[in-house]
């Protein structure tokens, strides 16, 4: 049975329309009921969207209605959830965020008592529980409390991990996307000695991801170029991903950041199992570089949860996505944009990001084709399978193509890698046209 509400990263949609207070309460109640504890202790954190407070109240009510104790940590990056779960032995964590989506959207994602996101099977159990909401009543009504010091706990964990990283004399620009990193990121960089300039750190509930952050890096690129910074880092709304900008204004994506980290951790004996896990979107050049370095690579479907599953299965620690989700389970079992930015600077060992040589990227083109709804997405992907197979065969041994439906937005993502930019553009153009016709 397929899940109807949960996508690749929780339940997500327009707040107040799809993701209502009623649905949020029901999801939290169902998730809390399945926890095997006399009084489940549940952490709740959120990003800066104006709908966050409403959904926080609804989730807290659902937890209490199931007999649990809701601990409200306030605005905190998503990776703060698994870290706090581990520190305080919470039974469940709830993050309210729609990540890089516009402010009107919001989402709910759950972390288990082990700090990992709930599995597809458990999410399906929660959905099924919504179909029979009048289960056994809780033995007692729960409580709702404020968790004091959540931000400081997160900062302390970062400082402990990167205590040996001295950023004195480094000029760093940070784009906090008016999101969950707006306090944490500047503070930890300053504690480590960096000279920090911050963009988009004044959230008003509606400006999260609005022309800023890791999905809109132009402002950061211009700022780094004009300001003579050593590097810049752009986070997304919930702080679980990051993109970098070198002093020349070149954007450094997740593939290159993971490659840098893999080579550094391998060199220092901190790459468990000698492997990394990445997704099908990862550039062909990454695979070539890792093969040359003797680093094994596992490839997963798109979604950081699948990367984490591959890491757990193999006993590895490092993985991530081209979009900037970078996971080091030695620190936290979640993508962490701030930790990834610090790991990047650690990996440079005092060098310059502009002088990186971790991998050579194959020219890649990625186009998002917006369609009407989920049915149109699936139909378009199925209808273009023949065209995709033909283009893939033509590029065999030289590049690749990938056409897939997004798990979080009504988009079909068309990706092409080829030896030249011209060939990548031509193949991508043909496939985009085919998707548009099929989805009309």
Image: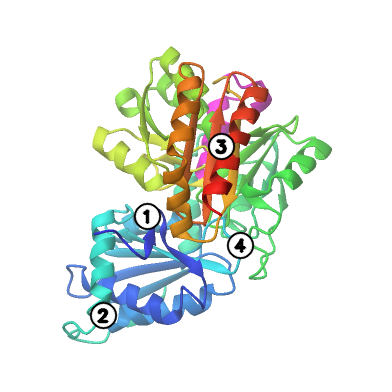
Where does label 1 land, which residue? 82
Left or right: 249 as drawn, with respect to 213:
right
Whether the residues at callouts 1 and 4 have beta carbons within 8 Å, the answer is: no
Mark 1 to mark 4 CA distance (whole Å): 25 Å
Q: Is residue 222 above or below residue 55?
A: above
Q: In the rendered picture of this protein, how many numbered marks are placed on residues?
A: 4
Q: Earlier in the sequence, mark 4 or mark 3?
A: 4
Left or right: 206 as drawn, with respect to 238:
right
Q: Earlier in the sequence, mark 2 or mark 1?
A: 2
Residue at image location 80% in from the left, 36% down from the top? 225
Q: Quadrant of the C terminus?
A: bottom right
Where does label 3 land, which residue? 431
Q: Earlier in the sequence, mark 4 or mark 2?
A: 2
Left or right: 308 as drawn, with respect to 340:
left
Q: Earlier in the sequence, mark 1 or mark 3?
A: 1
Question: Magenta segment range?
Answer: 338-357
Where does label 4 land, which residue? 102
* Visual colour scheme: rainbow
Mark 1 to mark 3 CA distance (whole Å): 40 Å
Residue at image location 83% in from the left, 39% down from the top? 226
Q: Which mark is residue 144?
A: none
Where does label 2 land, which residue? 66
Q: Nearer the viewer, residue 213 or 412?
A: 412
Q: Earlier in the sequence, mark 1 or mark 4?
A: 1
Viewer-nearest of labels 4 and 2? 4
Mark 2 to mark 1 CA distance (whole Å): 22 Å
């Amino acid at each position: 049975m397929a899940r109807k509400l949960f996508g690749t990263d929780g339940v997500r949609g327009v707040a107040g329309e799809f993701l209502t207070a009623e649905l949020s309460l029901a999801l939290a109640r169902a998730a809390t009921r399945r926890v095997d504890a006399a009084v489940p202790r549940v952490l709740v954190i959120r990003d800066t969207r104006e709908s966050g407070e409403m959904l926080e109240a609804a989730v807290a009510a659902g937890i209490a209605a199931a007999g649990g104790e809701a601990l409200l940590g306030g605005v905190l990056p998503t990776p703060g959830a698994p870290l706090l779960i581990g520190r305080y032995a919470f039974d469940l964590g709830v993050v309210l965020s729609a990540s890089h989506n516009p402010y009107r959207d919001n989402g709910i994602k759950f972390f288990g008592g082990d700090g990992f996101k709930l599995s597809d099977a458990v999410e399906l159990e929660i959905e099924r529980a919504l179909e029979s909401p009048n289960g056994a009543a809780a033995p007692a009504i729960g409580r709702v409390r404020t968790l004091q010091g959540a931000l400081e706990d997160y900062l302390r964990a970062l400082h402990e991990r990167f205590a040996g990283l001295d950023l004195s004399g480094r000029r760093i620009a940070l784009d906090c996307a008016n999101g969950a990193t707006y306090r944490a990121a500047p503070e930890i960089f300053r504690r480590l000695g960096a000279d920090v300039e911050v963009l988009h750190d004044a959230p008003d509930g509606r400006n999260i991801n609005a022309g800023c952050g890791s999905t809109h890096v132009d402002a950061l690129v211009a700022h780094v170029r004009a300001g003579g910074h050593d590097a810049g880092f752009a986070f997304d709304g919930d702080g679980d991903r990051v993109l970098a900008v070198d002093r020349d204004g070149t954007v450094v994506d997740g593939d290159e950041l993971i490659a840098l980290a893999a080579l550094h951790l391998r060199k220092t004996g901190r790459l468990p199992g000698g492997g990394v896990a990445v997704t099908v979107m990862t550039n062909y050049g990454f695979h070539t570089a890792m093969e040359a370095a003797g680093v094994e690579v596992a490839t997963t479907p798109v979604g950081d949860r699948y990367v984490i599953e591959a890491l757990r299965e193999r006993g590895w620690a490092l993985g991530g996505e081209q979009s900037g989700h970078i996971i080091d389970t030695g620190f936290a079992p979640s993508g962490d944009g701030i930790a990834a930015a610090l790991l990047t600077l650690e990996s440079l060992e005092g060098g310059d990001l502009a002088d990186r040589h971790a991998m050579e990227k194959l020219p890649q083109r990625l186009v998002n084709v917006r369609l009407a709804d989920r049915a149109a997405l699936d139909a378009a992907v199925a209808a273009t399978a023949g065209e995709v197979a033909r283009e893939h065969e033509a590029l065999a041994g030289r590049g690749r193509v990938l056409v897939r439906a997004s798990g979080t937005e009504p988009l079909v993502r068309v990706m092409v890698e080829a030896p030249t930019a011209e060939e990548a553009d031509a193949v991508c153009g043909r496939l985009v046209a085919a998707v548009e016709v099929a989805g009309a």
